Image (cartoon, rainbow, N blue to C red):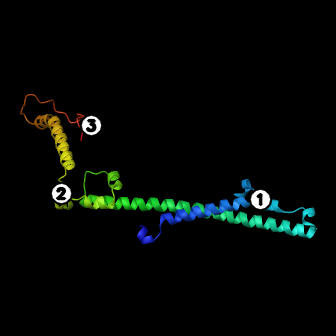
Amino acid sequence: MTDRLDVDPQVLAAAADGITRTIDSMSQIGISESGTLGRGFSLLALSPLEAGRMSVQRSMEGFAERWEWGVRALVQAGNAIAEALGLAAGRYHVMDQHGEDALKNIVNDVIGNPHLSDDEVSAQSWSETLANNPYNMVAHPDFSADSAAAASEQIRQNDATLAELTPQALANLTAASQVDIPGLPDAGWDTGMLGGGQR
């Protein structure tokens, strides 16, 4: 997605942060409580005594008031831009991540490990996703001690599961026939033996 649109979410986030910091700097010029709204410049107006002449005082007052309204408009526009960029960056990142995760799941469904959940596939890097396929496993087998130990443990768990489920499976198979095998449990389809009922 980023290749097609050529937009980096980091750039959008940096732009939003830059605008926010600029607004913070502008708020320091006025009164801190009102600076975030672009206010406070009208307080810089001089009294007639300080200005020396009434025309100077009025000119300064008008300038400060116009300046305040201009800064207020800039601050509000900057806030809107920063908010829009911030939301756009977040939305863009989420959509980009969803697209990448969906593509990883498609690749995994076609050539990968069918036993992995969507979350497990999303947590993998692209190199792990592409490497996790039957061809690669045959071409580059893992003969390490860790792999052998993991395989041995998986075989042990499978044997234990088969030993536990085989009597019930035989009882279910023979329930429709007249064959009576002693020692089997009663036929039952929802035994809970697989941790949650019928499978």
Q: In this view, does 36 lie to the left or right of 16?
A: right
- Residue 37 visible in the snapshot: no
- Check contact, mark 1 vs mark 3: CB within 8 A: no
- x%, y% of residue 46? 87, 63
Quarter of the image with the C terminus in it: top left
What secondary structure is found at the residue carrying circle 1?
A: loop
Q: In this view, does 64 lie to the left or right of 140?
A: right
Of 65 and 53, which appears nearest the observer? 53
Q: In front of the other: label 1 or label 3?
A: 1
What secondary structure is found at the residue carrying circle 3?
A: loop
Quarter of the image with the N terminus in it: bottom left
Q: How far apart are marks 2 and 3 (CA)?
A: 33 Å
- x%, y% of residue 196? 28, 37
- x%, y% of residue 53? 93, 68
Instruction: Identify residue for label 3.
Output: 195
Q: As shown in the figure, which amino acid type bears the numbered disc 3?
A: Gly
Instruction: Identify residue for label 1.
Output: 40
Q: Which residue is drawn at 41% across and 70% down?
A: 3
Badge 1 or badge 2: first in the primary sequence: 1
* Residue at the far top in the pictured view: 183
Label number found at residue 185: none
